[in-house]
Amino acid sequence: MDGGMLKGKGLHKFFGGLRAIDFLDFIVPEGKVKSVIGPNGAGKTTLFNMITGVIPPTGGILEFAGRSLNGLKPHVIARLGISRTFQHLELFGNMTVLENVMLGRHGKTASGIFSAGLRLPRMRREEKEIRENALQELRFMGLEDRAMLSASALPLGEQKLLEIARALATQPKLLLLDEPAAGLNTRETVKLSETILRIRDRGITIMLVEHDMSLVMEISDEVLVLNYGKKIAEGSPRDVQRTPEVIAAYLGEEAGNA
């Protein structure tokens, strides 16, 4: 497989007789926003779960930056530079906003249990760096003034931004966003759109699962359309909009107006 940061070849996932992902080929170009759309049950979250090692493929190939992901555990894949957010927020509501983001960075630390337990200089330096990195990400997301608040005290829109900030703290090369606009109002969605483009401009590749077609068509460089686990279209937002199979399966009458 040539080109692209993330590539799938013949990728499939079967749950008994259900083909959740059905021999899928795809490429996510480096430095781009690639959206994955399709009806409920199309296999979008299953695809994300395979990319991040939550579930193994039944077969096929997954490659990231030239390395096979097949058989790797989630923490190994995260260390390679893939981070994600979830459909349902996975924040620690009893911790502060800052602490939530610092947790994302801890996976990159080098100090062991011995250093941490004794508070050796190396560990203290790393802890300071983690805090500074977390504050930088909060500043980038416009949440710096919320740093000492409880995460549960934030409104939904800011909680979504917080989860993205925590994912960015892992210093990903590829960021997977699973329905980040779900539940947001128009103003919050506009801010999210601007944020995703600013993340892309940092050189981070983005793969996005989203039902908000206006958002998808506005920010995507490429769109992959799934239906019953099969790819029915892939290309620019404009080209995908005009594909009859896509209109029939998902976009409906909205396709002409998006």
Image: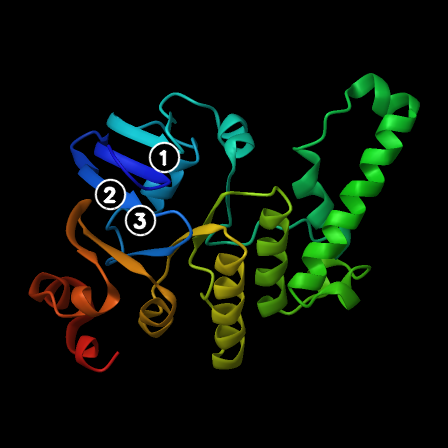
Amino acid type at image mark 2 = Phe
Q: Pointer 2 and pointer 3: residues touching (CB < 8 Å)?
A: no
Callout 3: SS: helix
Q: Residue 26 carries which label?
A: 2
Residue 27 in picture, x, y percent from top left: 28, 43
Callout 1: SS: helix
- In the picture shown, does residue 9 fall above or below 35? above
Residue visible at 48% across and 65% down?
A: 197
Q: Which mark is residue 89?
A: none
Q: Which of marks 1 and 2 is nearer the N terminus?
A: 2
Q: In which quarter of the image is residue 222?
A: bottom left
Residue placed under numbered mark 3 in the picture: 44
CA separation, marks 3 and 1?
Answer: 10 Å
Q: Residue 50 carries which label?
A: 1
CA separation, marks 1 and 2?
Answer: 14 Å
- In the picture shown, does residue 44 fall above or below 217? above
